[in-house]
Image (tube, rainbow, N blue to C red):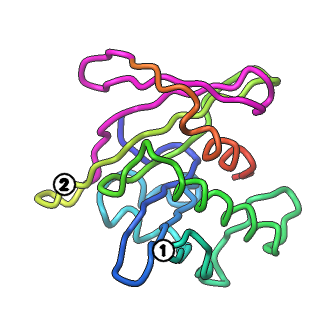
Amino acid sequence: MPIFTKTGAFLQRIETSNNVQVIIKLIRPNNYSDATNQPNRDTLTHIPTLTLHINDDGKTVKLDFDPWSDINVNSDSNIDEKDIGIVTDLALAFFHQTIITSEFAGYLYRLPADPSEFRVGVEILEFDENDQKFYSYDVLETESLDSGARFQGARRNPQTGKVYEYGTALEALLKAFIKLEL
């Protein structure tokens, strides 16, 4: 199945000499259907980019984004400080998590679940420089049976199907992600 076909968030950590940048792309396939059919670097160029700049000490410098981009991520239909706060929290949670390392990117999306539960798919993506495409390196299956208060999960190898438990290492990231209303 091609990546970027589900509503969610693409996150990538880029380390520079001055700071760390977390790239955020809000994936809304209905809005970008032409762009999301081919999972390559160009796919993401059609989707507005938000960049959180973080100092070495982990303090936020600033969130950069095109003011005309659709970054509304809550139900009030306005792009305001609440949206900026939710996206900033997501980027900081991605910065602090340790499962998806800087040589990979992450793609988070909701999975079907009962009303009192949350299920989130987390794809770890690897970029192939030769053919300029992202490939699914690993798939993490997470769930919260208590309305998002706690998450647990397992890591499934896409090639072998073997499952590894990884506990709650992504809990802060998942809690920040479920606040998005895409």
Judged left or right of residue 129, residue 162 is right
Q: Position of residue 87 (x, y in %)?
A: 67, 63
Residue found at the far right of this picture: 76
Q: Are marks 2 and 1 in contact (CB under 8 Å)?
A: no
Q: Magenta region: which residues?
A: 134-163
Q: Is residue 24 above or below residue 136?
A: below
In-front residue for pair 132/84 = 84
Q: In front: mark 2 or mark 1?
A: 1
At x 40%, y 84%, the residue is 18
Q: Position of residue 164 (x, y in %)?
A: 39, 19
Q: Could you say which disc has been placed on residue 47 in the image?
A: none
Bin the neighbour count of mark 2 within 10 Å (Cα to Cα): few under 14, some 14-19, many 20 and up.
Answer: few
Q: Disc 2 or 1, which lies upstream in sequence?
A: 1
Badge 2 element: strand
Q: Does residue 80 show up magenta in the picture?
A: no
Determine which quarter of the picture holds residue 75.
bottom right
Q: Is residue 84 above or below residue 62?
A: above
Judged left or right of residue 128, residue 32 is right
At x 60%, y 30%, the residue is 111
Q: Name the quadrant of the N terminus.
A: top left
Q: Could you say which disc has been placed on residue 128 in the image?
A: 2
At x 53%, y 44%, the residue is 108
Residue found at the far left of this picture: 130
Q: Position of residue 72 (x, y in %)?
A: 74, 65
Instruction: From the image, tell me which residue sits under label 1.
Output: 56
Total numbered badges shown on the rendered structure? 2
Q: Does residue 144 show up magenta in the picture?
A: yes
Amino acid type of disc 2? Answer: Asp
Q: CA distance from mark 2 to mark 1?
A: 28 Å
At x 78%, y 32%, the residue is 149
Q: Position of residue 104 (x, y in %)?
A: 33, 52
Bin the neighbour count of mark 1 within 10 Å (Cα to Cα): few under 14, some 14-19, many 20 and up.
Answer: few
